[in-house]
Amino acid sequence: MSVILAIESSCDETSVAICNNGKITANVIANQTIHQNYGGVIPELASRVHQQNIVPVIQQALGDAKVSKKELNAVAFTQGPGLLGSLLVGVSFAKSFALALDLPLISVNHMHAHILAHFIDDPKPKFPFICLTVSGGHTQIVVVRSHFDMEIVGETLDDAAGEAFDKTAKILSLPYPGGPLIDKYAAGGNPLAYKFGEPQIKDLNYSFSGFKTSILYFIRNQEKENPNFISENLNDICASVQHSIVHILLNKLKKAAKQYGIKEIAIAGGVSANSGLRAGLTALAEELNWNVYIPAFQYCTDNAAMIAIAGHFKYLNRDFVEQDVAPLSRMEF
Ligand code: KG4
Ligand code: ZN
């Protein structure tokens, strides 16, 4: 029997979940809308809002799961990677909470947890599988051999896929975070209206910084001819940008699947909520006979349920950390 309380605070979501014997019984997420006023996450503000949110979010999660503090067996938390000030709030709270209740502490790597979110619901991927993890800070192709035997075989050399979405949105004057808005406007547009080149990067790696610059120049050139270019063509621009990013992401995923001879394929992270990526992966599954695993929307973007399920597996291994544990903004994978 294990009842684990898990805390996620690596960026701008304060989230607490409860995992009861491998089943998620609460997953409370407090989003920080304040950053929309600034066009991006302001680290100093994020940690202050985590500080305000953490106690009510803990209380709500315990209430939703109908468990008392006395019934908990362990406290899991995101140790990194992420914003240091944000992580500090979650890590410090987890340590104090565990100390007060005399519970073991479980450290979780946020990037492992995005992948392990696939073990919350059925169907679960079979080992070994390949996971494309695409978030606001990371783009990684990972070969997953067991719950904690994971190897990065490709990654971005500069910007993450989520940044490519968010920075394009900024160029189009859409509010932060722009990824979901590009997805929304793309639905009504022609994905082949404009063409953006695919970066020629070696092996299984990605690069998105040149891609973002090419969009910037394209928009500037078009606006010289027509100052209303963006507003008149927003759907087509978003559909074309999304189509290009998805194409780049899936091409390397195809290459990885072939190279490793693996047909169990998963996606994870915030960008796995993107409808173009989800549809593109489903189409590839048919074409290449893959079994694909696409997370439920609530487990794509940051959430503590994924920390709780990772905590559950670590609890089974009695993999605990001591009270001297500290947050790591650049935690090793
Ligand atoms: O995993 P996540 O919540 O946080 C990090 O760990 O970074 O990912 C956030 C990223 C943001 O860049 C956001 O714009 C992007 O995921 N995102 C999307 C969509 N939903 C979230 N990008 C494209 N389409 C979406 N529907
Ligand atoms: Zn994340």
Image: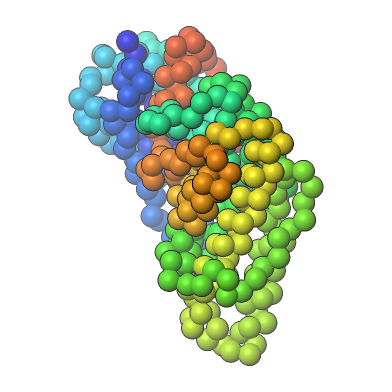
* Rendering colour mode: rainbow
Q: Residue at x 40, y 26 (%)?
A: 308
Is residue 50 something one can see in this rendering?
no
Of all residues, the one furthest to the bottom in this rendering is: 225
Q: Is residue 241 above or below residue 24?
A: below
Q: Quadrant of the N terminus?
A: top left
Q: Is residue 310 above or below residue 297?
A: above
Q: Residue at x 44, y 11 (%)?
A: 316
Q: Quadrant of the C terminus?
A: top right
Residue 199: x and y, percent? 73, 58
Residue 16: x and y, percent? 35, 33
Q: In terms of image quadrants, where is residue 61?
A: top left
User: How many numbered discs, if any?
Assistant: 0
Q: Is residue 274 above or below residue 295?
A: below
Q: Nearer the viewer, residue 60 or 138?
A: 138
Q: Is residue 281 above or below residue 224?
A: above
Left or right: residue 58 versus residue 227 is left
Q: Residue at x 46, y 24 (%)?
A: 310
Q: Nearer the viewer, residue 237 or 62?
A: 237
Left or right: residue 39 versus residue 143 is left
Residue 254: x and y, percent? 65, 45
Residue 106: x and y, percent? 47, 19
Q: Residue at x 54, y 68 (%)?
A: 191
Is residue 246 something one can see in this rendering?
yes
